[in-house]
Image: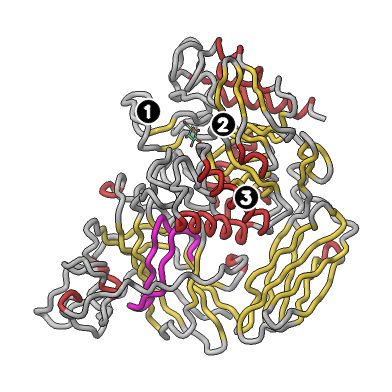
Amino acid sequence: MFVLSRMLGAAACALALSWQAPAAAQAPAQPAATPAPAPLLQNAYGRQHLSLNGRWNYIIDPYEMGYYDYRRQPFDASPSGKGGFYEDLKPKNKGEWVEYDFDLAPTLNVPGDWNSQAEKLSLYEGTVWMRQVFQAEPKADKRYVLYFGAVNYEAHVYLNGKKLGTHKGGFTPFQFDVGGKLNKGRNVVIVKADNTRHQDEIPTVNTDWWNYGGITRDVMLVELPATYIADYKVQLAKGDPKRIDVAVRVDGAQPAQDVVVEIPEAGIKASARTDAGGRAAFSIPARALRYWSPEDPKLYRVRIAAGPDSVEDRIGFRTIETRGKDILLNGKSIFLRGISLHDENPLIPGRLRGEGDMRMMLQWAKELNANYVRLAHYPHSERMVRLADEMGLLVWAEVPVYWTISWNNPDTYRNASSQLTDLVVRDKNRASVIVWSIGNETPVSAPRNAFMGRLADTVRGLDDTRLVAAALEVHREGKNVVVQDPLADKLDLASFNEYAGWYWSSTKDMLNYRFDIKYDKPVVITEFGADALGGYHADDETRWSEEYQALIYRNQFRMLTAIPGLRGMTPWVLADFRSPRRQHPYFQDFWNRKGLVSETGQKKKAFQVLKDFYDEMQKTYK
Ligand code: GCB
């Protein structure tokens, strides 16, 4: 039994530390040696864990005085390591100087972005310190991992006053080994979260979504045996519906173990021995599987055991491939009736806070008769993808390589590549995920082609069983909308965004355009759309009206169905979402209004137009 228990509310227990001289008065600081997070644990949710979600005390620190001394030297890089807010100090004596106090600081809910939880933070970009206190009784024969679903953007994590490490990237999980670092009794975890945008980061400074900061996804302390299953992949072999490929990595004290994989409902039990490095890869014949599909999202209970450890998952089995202009799901041509969505709840603006919010979004997609969602423009939560598995929605999963990235910077590339890797590592067992997208609307140039080309190779190297794509741009030559991009040679889909009727051409003139797509690949339109203020009605030539948006959808269907090889679409976008780029004081007021659902949850006219189109496609598509 897991014997950690959570202490709710902050304990006012003073730590036995006294205030130190500022670090600048001592030896000059060395660049902080910041350990990288440990390799990701597969299926953290399926493990014994203590949730550290709940109310966290927070301190807004725009000048980062809890991180740097007055000479701008980081406290955590000074020889004493003292002076930073991560010490969680309380004055020991009456006269002592301490200018912060977590116990008296207000609280925020985790998981949750900070912008939507405090007036002062709604437009804030910078550092916020967050603290949680919990009780633990660590056992000598167990390992412990502190796991974060996501922190936007840069996280410095401290446990009991000591730095565990840092992580960059706002949408992927990370973890630190904390074995030997937990106290028996009271423990304090402090996160310095900083959502400042930078040109060289992923994403870069310029996006069309709200830069929600903070600990936006679950936090947990995971307990593992000394030898444990660190990672596994259990999926159908590429192009072979009669074979399950298994890869397992065991870590810890004795990585050489017998591994057993069981799928009781399918009568499957197979085993193999891991090598000295803890790895095993083997295939299992699978003759009588019920394949996962949107119509029948069958998930099997899969049990993996190795030595003292075992873990359970729910996994679906399906194949996905392209042949010429066709997308084949389980060998059968499919039309992707999709919709794009952000990880944002329009009703209480902010990141999706939990399964209820996520179900609401995916249920709207279902009401459109969608079988597919584009989780734009960054990795959504693991829980969202698991829900898509359960609800029968195919998924396009993406990394925030968006617009004008610093293509020539090797660090920027490493960052993009590690976000993509972490996404694949996390979601590789999800049947719903059929597409890895390496980016959105990245303008063609030699350095960009090289950067994106490498990303495409990287993701294929990690997983050759799914499709690789990107949302490309189009250009116009006369009345031709041309799709031509050197990157397309490395991709499985001809997928692109086009805004006929909104950013170019009129509602009438758009119908004179033809698509000129240079590739013999399935065509999947990743975006089209138009803004409409929910409840604003006018004739269909009036911008911002629901009628205008509905007309654009009808005209788009006329244009798009003329494309030979059209195999799907994800119009932009399911729900209105907040964006600092959207400045019209009446129609926008910081909202991108291309949603089919308004910020009050009202379905705009175009919602029904798209649903009717999908109903028709479902009937006629063979
Ligand atoms: C796009 C972007 C998307 C924007 C959308 C718009 O092409 O991919 O992130 O929000 O257009 O509304 O302009």
Q: Which mark is residue 57?
A: none
The numbered mark, 1 or 2, whose residue comes first in the sequence reads 2
The numbered mark, 3 or 2, whose residue comes first in the sequence reads 3
Amino acid at circle 3: Ala
How many other residues sit within 10 Å of disc 1, few (<14), some (14-19) or many (≥20)? Answer: many
Taking 576 as reference, is 533 above or below it?
Answer: above
Q: Using residue 93 as the reference point, say whether residue 189 is left or right of it.
A: right
Disc 1/disc 2 C-alpha distance (Å): 22 Å
Pick out the residue farthest to the bottom: 140
Q: Pick the residue in front: 61 or 492.
A: 492
Pick out the residue farthest to the left: 95
Q: What residue did someone put label 1 on?
A: 588
Q: Pick the residue in front: 616 or 231.
A: 231
The magenta region covers 148-171
The image shows a total of numbered marks equal to 3
Check if residue 161 falls in the magenta segment.
yes
How many other residues sit within 10 Å of disc 3, few (<14), some (14-19) or many (≥20)? Answer: many
